[in-house]
Image: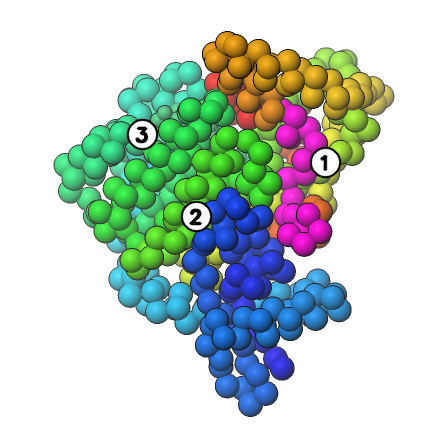
Amino acid sequence: MSLSVVSSRAASSLLPGAVSSAPSGHGFSQMSSIGYVSKVGNGQALGCKASSEFLGLALKAVRISGGLQKPWVRHLCRAALAPEVEAVVGKQAWRSKSPKDTNVMIVGATGYIGKFVVKEMVKRGYNVIAVAREKSGIGGKADAEQTIKDFPGATVLFADVSDMDSISSALQSSKTNVDVVISCLASRTGGKKDSWKIDYQATRNSLDAGVANGASHFVLLSAICVQKPLLEFQKAKLKFEAELASHGNGLTYSIVRPTAFFKSLGGQVQSVQGGGPYVMFGDGKLCACKPISEADLASFISDCVSDVEKANQMLPIGGPGKALTPLEQGEMLFKIVGKDPKFIKVPIGVMDFVIGVLDNLSKVFPNLEDAAEFGKIGRYYAAESMLVMDPETQKYDADGTPSYGTDTLEAFFDRCVREGMAGQELGDQAVF
Ligand SMILES: NC(=O)c1ccc[n+]([C@@H]2O[C@H](COP(=O)([O-])OP(=O)(O)OC[C@H]3O[C@@H](n4cnc5c(N)ncnc54)[C@H](OP(=O)(O)O)[C@@H]3O)[C@@H](O)[C@H]2O)c1
């Protein structure tokens, strides 16, 4: 038997980057199966569901033999589109237009990643509609005039995406047809209510408003951590991911699940530079990540518009190089600043104790609910790797986490030490 195309739920349990790599029970078990085809014996293509068990077994055999580690197998698995996807893509008129005639609406345009996506899409020649609030950025520091200045080459559309009427009427009055929507929306706090308001509802509003104005492709900036959803923002994201993937009606999607951003790893640069210790949990090896820069991620997200092979795909993505633990990140930083390494190792139990106290207090004082959630977010990132998780073993897999781009964490640390941390500020609650 030879494999020809794999883009399926069966295959997804084996292939990083395919649908339903997350545990079931969080929407993925209901996600649309994109379908799969296998060439058997005489080369005849078998239809989707009938061959699923056979294909699953065959892939398992390939995997057990170490086959999926081999580049040629990965290439074959990604080499062509499933016929179902090809049929949908074939009907999307915008795919045959040039970028200058393709209208791309970007929501979350004023965020850390969104800004770079606007810049990259303008650079690639697309007709970019950047949706923004009148007051945007951390703490609402940028006014409308500043936002327009920040986005040369793009049309700025002021609207509130958390309000369906606002985004719908802004689009209608602009009389702009939308071909593609890119969402880089995210709660700036990570608080419970705000997560549902933005990571779910505002993102859903953007999808509905985009589709009502002609959009037939949606690129979602999600997060790799939704594979193990313990936090409220992850659950909100997963609900939207599931609705997006099962939308149908001629809509295709690319769900981008990146690993850690540079800003989330740069928090100790200045204190280490000033002679302070590097603080980490446990032995500094509880977790690892493959950090990706804003520019590299923006480029990958932009590829999701032009590259049909990224249609109807779940795409975990990290930056270049090997996965790095906090201990390795700290050692790298001390080397760059030219100081002897000095570490403080905090037992992870300390965080559990604090979260336990906050959780109990929040039952009596509901306004402490978000404080407890922020503690849980901190705990999660202290101990969970931002890497693809093998769904069978539930273990993080550094080799199975795809890399993209050229910007390294080392070069980022070096730049921060020389030029400071401008542009790397964390969100309103300084959690992420
Ligand atoms: N930090 C990490 O290491 C990491 C790793 C992997 C994935 N991610 C994911 O990446 C995504 C984007 O992160 P980011 O750092 O670029 O986000 P960000 O800088 O916080 O930007 C959030 C965007 O959403 C908009 N937004 C937030 N609240 C809004 C509201 N109430 N109404 C309208 N717009 C609102 C913001 O607009 P304003 O400017 O108007 O506030 C901004 O454009 C998140 O989903 C995150 O989970 C993060």
Figure quarter occupied by ligand 1: top left
Which residue corresponds to mark 2?
A: 242
Instruction: Tell me if residue 107 is in the magenta stretch.
Output: no
In the image, is residue 408 above or below residue 70? above
Q: Amino acid at mark 3?
A: Ser
Q: CA distance from mark 1 to mark 3?
A: 34 Å
From the image, state whether disc 2 or disc 1 is nearer to you: 2
Q: Which residue is mark 1?
A: 287
Secondary structure mostly seen in magenta is loop
Are circles 2 and 1 on residues that touch, CB within 8 Å? Answer: no
Asked whether mark 3 lies closer than 8 Å to ligand 1, one says yes
Q: Residue at x 37, y 56 (%)?
A: 252
Looking at the rendering, which quadrant does residue 329 occupy? top right
Residue interval drawn in magenta: 378-394
The residue positioned 21% from the left and 37% from the top of the image is 168
Relative placement, left or right, of 85 versus 2 is left
The reply to whether residue 193 is visible in this rendering is yes
Q: Who comes first in sequence, dot 3 or dot 2?
A: 3
Q: Residues within 10 Å of mark 1 (few under 14, many from 20)?
A: many
Residue at left offset 53%, top offset 14%: 363
Most extreme residue toward the bottom is 42
For this orientation, the residue located farthest to the front is: 364
Q: Looking at the picture, how far across and down is residue 409, in whole percent?
A: 66, 36
For mark 2, give the secondary structure.
helix
Q: Which residue is mark 3?
A: 162
Residue at (28% x, 33% y) in the render: 156
Image position of 95 (left or right of 332): left
Quadrant of the image containing the C terminus = top right
Residue 108 falls in image quadrant:
top left
Q: Mark 3 falls on what kind of element?
A: loop
